[in-house]
Image (cartoon, rainbow, N blue to C red):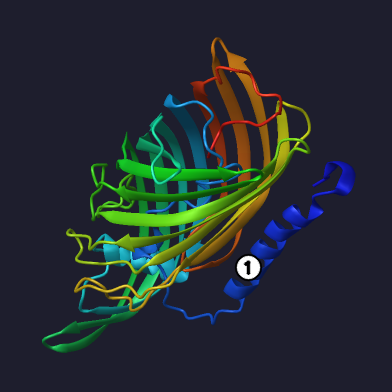
Amino acid sequence: MQIKGGKSLSTAGFVWRLGAAAIAALLALPNDPARADEGGVSFWLPGFFGSLAAVPAQTPGWSMTSIYWHDSVSAGGNVARAREIEIGRIPANLSANVSANLNSNLNLGLLIGTYTFATPVLGGQASASLMGIYGSNSTSLAGSLTGTLTTPGGAIPFSRFDSIDSSLTAFGDLYPTFQLKWNAGVNNFMTYVTGDIPAGAYQSTRLANIGIGHWAIDAGGGYTYFDPKTGHEASAVLGFTYNFINPATQYQSGVDMHLDWGASQFLTKQWQVGLVGYLYQEIGCDSGSGNRVGCFRSRVAGVGPQVGYIFPVGDMQGYLNLKAYGEFANENRPAGWNLWLTFNLQPAAATPPTSSRPRFTK
C-alpha cells in the first residue's frame, strides 16, 4: 500500500506487525487433530469489522447498512467427520474413520439498522443496532466411512460411502449490538457487545443451515488511527465469543477469539484503497453430553484487498466498500475465500467538514 508523503508509515506498519505477530502465533500452535467449533461453524463472521471501525458517526440518528456476503469454502478429515456426527449420520456405537470432502457456498444478505444517540454515554457516542440475515446455503459432502460397529454380539467391521447434497434459502439468526465510541484527535476507540438470537433456519439433522441453533454473546474493543489531513487509516478490533449449549445436540462450543483489522489510504475525499485481514482462534475446549469429538478447537486466518467510495445520496451520505479475503492456516474449520460488498447510508453532517473524514464505521 502506498502512503502519501511517507509520514505515517508507522501506523500501517503497526497493523502489519500486529497481523504478522498474530499469524505467527497461530501457526506456532501445535497441530492437535481434534480442534473446532461444532461442525466447524462459528457465531462470528470473521471480517465483519474492518477499516474505520472505531470512528464515531458525525451525525446522530438512523442509518442503514446492507451487505452482500459470499463464502466459498471446503474441508475434509475432521470437519467432515464432525458434520456427519452432528447430523446423526455416524451412530454413537460406531468408531469410524472418515475420508470425505465437504464443500459449501453461501450467498447471504445482511441488513443492519442502527440508531446513533445524540446524548453522550460515559463521554462517548452510543449506538444500538439490529442485524437480520436472509440468503442461501448449498453444502455437499462425499466420501467413505470405515470402522467398527459395536453390537451386543461383538464388534463388526463397517464400511459405507456417503454422498449428501443439502441446500436451503431462508432467514438467519438475529444479531443485536450496542457500541460506544470515543474520539481524541486522530485516535478513536470503541467497545461493543453483541449476541446471537437463534431465530434462523436450523435443523441439527440438516447439512445446510442458515442459523447456528444456539445462543451466543460476544464482546470486545477496537482502535482506529485516522488522520483526515493525510488520509492514513488503520483499525483493529479484538473480540471474544461465549457460546451457549445447542439444545438440539447438547453440544457446547468453547470460547472463541477473533481479531479483524484493516489499513487504508484515502487517495481523494471519496476514494479509499487498502488491505483487510482477520485471525480467528477458538481458545476454549468444546463440551456437553453431545460432544463426541473432544476438545475440538478451530482456527483460520484471512487477508485481502479493499476499496471504498464515498458519495452523496440526496441529503444523505452513501458509502460503498468492497473487500475480499483468501483464507489460510485453517485447522478443523472449512477454508476458502469470501467477499463482502457493503453499502451504508446515513445522514450527512449539518456543516460539511473541511477534511475528507468519512463516517462509515464497519
Residue at coordinates 71% horizontally, 64% vertically from top-left? 17
Q: Position of residue 244 (x, y in %)?
A: 25, 61
Q: Is residue 161 visible?
A: no
Q: Residue 95 is drawn in which quadrant?
A: bottom left
333 displayed left or right of 267: left
Q: Which residue is mark 1?
A: 23
**Residue reaching furthest top?**
314
Q: Position of residue 344 (x, y in %)?
A: 52, 27
Say above or below: 185 vs 148: above
Q: Nearer the viewer, residue 144 or 172?
A: 172
Q: Is residue 185 visible?
A: yes
Say above or below: 96 vs 311: below
Residue at coordinates 19% horizontally, 74% vertically from top-left? 289
Q: Position of residue 22 (x, y in %)?
A: 61, 68
Give neighbour class at mark 1: few <14, some 14-19, many 20+ (Cα, 10 Å): some
**SS for tag 1?**
helix
**Residue reaching furthest bottom?**
154
72 displayed left or right of 147: right
Q: Nearer the viewer, residue 299 or 279?
A: 279
Residue at coordinates 61% horizontally, 79% vertically from top-left? 28
Q: Nearer the viewer, residue 299 or 236?
A: 236
Amino acid type indicated by mark 1: Ile
Say above or below: 334 vs 146: above
345 displayed left or right of 309: left
